[in-house]
Structure formats: C-alpha cells, structure tokens
Amino acid sequence: MKDSIQFGSRVIDYEVSFSDRKTLGITVTPTSEVLVKAPASVNREKIKQVLQKRAAWIIKQQSFFLSFQPRLTERNYVSGETHLYLGRQYRLMIEEASQDSVKLLHGEIRVETTDRGKVKELMKAWYLQLARKKFEKIASELILKFRSEGVAPDSVVIRDMALRWGSCTPKGKIILNPELIKAPKGCIEYVIIHELCHLVHPDHSPAFFRLQSRYMPDWEKWKEKLERMMA
C-alpha cells in the first residue's frame, strides 16, 4: 500500500507492507524510499501518526543518503573543458597522436589519441587506474586503525554505482565508486570511514555517529565538500 503524509512543506511518500509482526518498523533506503513494515492489525491512521512523529528523522535520513548519490555534470570531452582530480580542476587538452595516452602534465590532463571519439573512454580508464592505486593506499591506512574495533575488511573493490559513493557488504567488503577519485582526499577518507563504521554499526544510530566522529572529528566538513563539489 502506498500513501503519503505532509510535514511542513514536505510531502513524505511511503509504502506499507503488512505481516504477522508485533511492531511497526520504518526504513529509509539509500534511494530515499520510505518503507513501513506494520502488524496486520494496525490501521492506516495509526501508521500516519507514527510517521508524523518520525518525520524529522525520515527527512534527515533522506538528506543524509543524498550526499552519497553522485550527481555529476555531463562533460563533452573537448579541449578547454575542465575536469576534476583529487578536488582540483584541470584543463583538458586533446592532441592527435599515433598512440593513445592520458597524462597529468603542467596543470593539464593531456589526452593523446588516434581518435577523438575515444577521449571519454580513455579518460574513464585513466581515472579507474588512478582510483585503484589511490583508494588502496588510503583504505589500507584507515583499515589498520579500525582493527581495534574488530573490523578487518577482506577487500576494497572499485565498482561503478549510479546511486552511491561507497557501500559495504556484511562479509566485510568495502565498495567504492571510481568517480570518487575526482574528490579531495578528505572526501575519500570520509566515505571509507563511513563504510568502515557500518561494519561495526549497520544503521545510522547515535553509536554509529559517535564512532565516525571519533575517527574523523571533522567528517561533516568533508561530507559538505563532497556534496558541493560533486553535485
């Protein structure tokens, strides 16, 4: 059953599923959907009352997840255009050549290619190569610190994700979006720490945020920077 409530100027849409459970549970998914699991005996008005009481928390969760949804500006991959790498803007220069290569040179991203139609593909491969190298180094240092929490991720995987900067699996695998290589190092550290904290606390409970603040006291600054730079 789908329904909605009004909270101030915001409309919160939600979907309800009923079962023989005894309590009502509310989940906000990474894609900002609100899912309600309710006992079969609970009526529609009671569900609305509970949602009204939790509305501020729901909106906070939705806003939090939005920071993990990449909204990158479309690029044309032409000379003179600017592209990000580790938080800095670099001008793209494309030159015809006998073989393909991408280099960071004198404040520019220089692409030499036999076919200008391949520039996007070449840059994506270049970014991926840099992401593998940088993420592994940054993650390994942070993982060492988290060993005291009983956390020992078995691997760091790079994977294209339309809706997330990072995620983790119950078995301890950290997954990072290669587009994160365009953000400053502090933003990369924030996403990795966030996922490491989830291996200790799967939800966004007060205990989760206390742990995140212990390992990165200024995490809110890097979260906001990631939102501003990559939106």
Image (tube, helix red, strand yellow):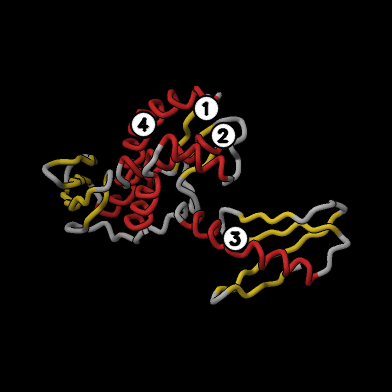
Distance of mark 2 from mark 4, alpha carbons? 18 Å
Residue marked by disc 4: 138
Going by the numbered disc 4, the residue's amino acid type is Ile
Residue in the image at 44% along x and 40% along y: 213
Instruction: Characterize the local packing of mark 1: few (<14), some (14-19) or many (20 or more) Cα atoms within 10 angstroms.
Output: many
Instruction: Give the secondary structure at mark 1.
Output: loop
Going by the numbered disc 2, the residue's amino acid type is Leu
Instruction: Characterize the local packing of mark 2: few (<14), some (14-19) or many (20 or more) Cα atoms within 10 angstroms.
Output: many
Would residue 66 appear left or right of 34 to someone viewing this image? left
User: Quadrant of the image for the N terminus?
Assistant: bottom right
Q: Is residue 131 above or below residue 46?
A: above
Pointer 3 or 2: first along the chain: 3
Would residue 212 appear left or right of 101 to someone viewing this image? right
Residue marked by disc 2: 199
Q: Are marks 1 and 2 in contact (CB under 8 Å)?
A: yes
Q: Residue furthest left?
A: 106
Distance of mark 3 from mark 2, alpha carbons? 22 Å
Mark 3 or 1: the one toward you: 3
Pick the residue in front: 139 or 115: 139
Pick the residue in front: 78 or 211: 211
Pointer 1 or 4: first along the chain: 4
Distance of mark 1 from mark 4, alpha carbons? 14 Å
Residue marked by disc 1: 153
Q: Is residue 166 above or below residue 173?
A: below
Pick the residue in front: 167 or 57: 57
Residue 58 is marked as 3
